[in-house]
Image: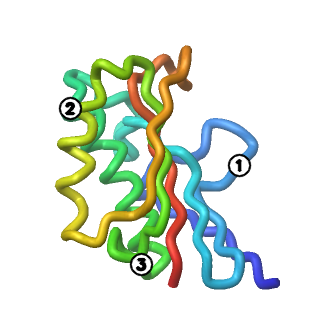
Amino acid sequence: MEKRIIQTPNAPAPIGPYNQAVFAGDTLYISGQIAIDPASGELNNKSLEEETHQCMRNLKAILETAGLSFGNVIKSTIFITDMNQFGVINGVYGQYFTGDFPARETVQVAALPKFVNVEISMIAVR
């Protein structure tokens, strides 16, 4: 099996011992992205909408570096700290797809890195 690491300066650098994404054959596994602005290194979480958009922009940058798009995504996982915020996050998330939505689960967790409200990971296929 071919394994290839994907890294881009257009998404936040990992804050631990992991990579932004890894290709295993034709499958791309993208690590969870939080609302870190890769240009400044700062959190972009002034509103829940902007926080979710930043997560999605980070995911888009990784997908594009791998030569893929949201159309290649087959599975997403959304981690949120408050299920009452699901509607807002879901509304932003849905703007990035054009119809063929991937499989997905949304899970409420007690806390996320840097105490953000949302983290999103994805699996895509070439």
The residue type indicated by label 3 comes to: Leu
Labels 2, 3: front one: 2
Q: Which class describes the residues within 10 Å of circle 2: few (<14), some (14-19), or many (20+)? A: few
Q: Is the C-beta separation of discs 1 and 3 under 8 Å?
A: no
Mark 2 residue element: helix
**Which is nearer the eye, 92 or 108?**
108
Q: Which residue is mark 1?
A: 18
Q: Using residue 115 as the reference point, say whether residue 48 is left or right of it.
A: left
Q: Position of residue 35 (x, y in %)?
A: 37, 36
The mark nearer the N terminus, 2 or 3, is: 3
The residue type indicated by label 1 comes to: Tyr
Q: Write the residue at 58% across / 71% down.
A: 28
The residue type indicated by label 2 comes to: Val
Q: Which residue is mark 3?
A: 68
Disc 1/disc 2 C-alpha distance (Å): 29 Å
**Which is nearer the eye, 65 or 91?**
91
Q: Position of residue 85 (x, y in %)?
A: 28, 23
Q: Write the residue at 48% across / 17% down.
A: 115
Q: Position of residue 92 (x, y in %)?
A: 20, 44
- Which label belongs to residue 88? 2
Q: Position of residue 2 (x, y in %)?
A: 77, 84
